[in-house]
Image (cartoon, rainbow, N blue to C red):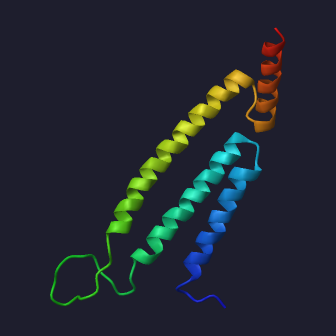
């Protein structure tokens, strides 16, 4: 049986594997971006999970509490979320431009068009 303390780590590992699989195994660029988002979420969970202590409070000095939760992981994850949203927005903008240029968002079809164009340029 999985103990309560390690459950978040198993979820994190599952999300990492699922996200990495989507990025590597799928040819659709939108699915790759979704996999990247899932992978980023697993990293957020990996940092947040040990940052919370049971019975811990906010790090405000008071005489009755002695256990404090560390706020640093939460601040780092807030920054990572902003960077992740910006990365996703840039990725989606690139997918739109690729769709306009190649009329597809499938990686195999884009590579086929590129190789055909390269072969055409070499023969002329």
Identify the residue at image location x=19%, y=90%: 64
Across the whole image, how many numbered discs are drawn on residues?
0
Viewer-nearest residue: 105 or 115 = 115
On the rendered image, what quadrant is the N terminus found in?
bottom right
Residue 36 in the image: state x and y as whole percent: 61, 52
Viewer-nearest residue: 115 or 4 = 115
Left or right placement of residue 77 versus residue 101 in this view:
left
Q: Quadrant of residue 95?
A: top right
Q: Is residue 113 above or below residue 3?
A: above
Q: Is residue 65 above or below residue 108?
A: below
Viewer-nearest residue: 118 or 43 = 118
Residue 97 in the image: state x and y as whole percent: 62, 26
Residue that extends furthest to the top in the rendered view of this protein: 124
Identify the residue at image location x=53%, y=37%: 90
Residue 9 in the image: state x and y as whole percent: 57, 76
Identify the residue at image location x=57%, y=32%: 93
Identify the residue at image location x=40%, y=75%: 51
């Amino acid at each position: 049986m999985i103990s309560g303390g390690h459950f978040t780590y198993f979820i994190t590992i599952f999300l990492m594997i699922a996200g990495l699989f989507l990025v590597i195994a799928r040819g659709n660029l939108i699915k790759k971006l979704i996999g990247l988002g899932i992978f980023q979420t697993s990293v957020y969970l990996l940092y947040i999970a040990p940052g919370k202590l049971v019975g811990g409070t906010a790090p405000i000095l008071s005489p009755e509490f002695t256990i404090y939760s560390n706020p640093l992981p939460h601040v780092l994850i807030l920054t990572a979320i902003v960077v992740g949203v910006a990365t996703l927005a840039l990725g989606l903008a690139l997918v739109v431009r690729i769709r306009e240029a190649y009329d597809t968002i499938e990686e195999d079809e884009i590579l086929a068009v590129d190789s055909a164009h390269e072969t055409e340029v070499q023969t002329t």
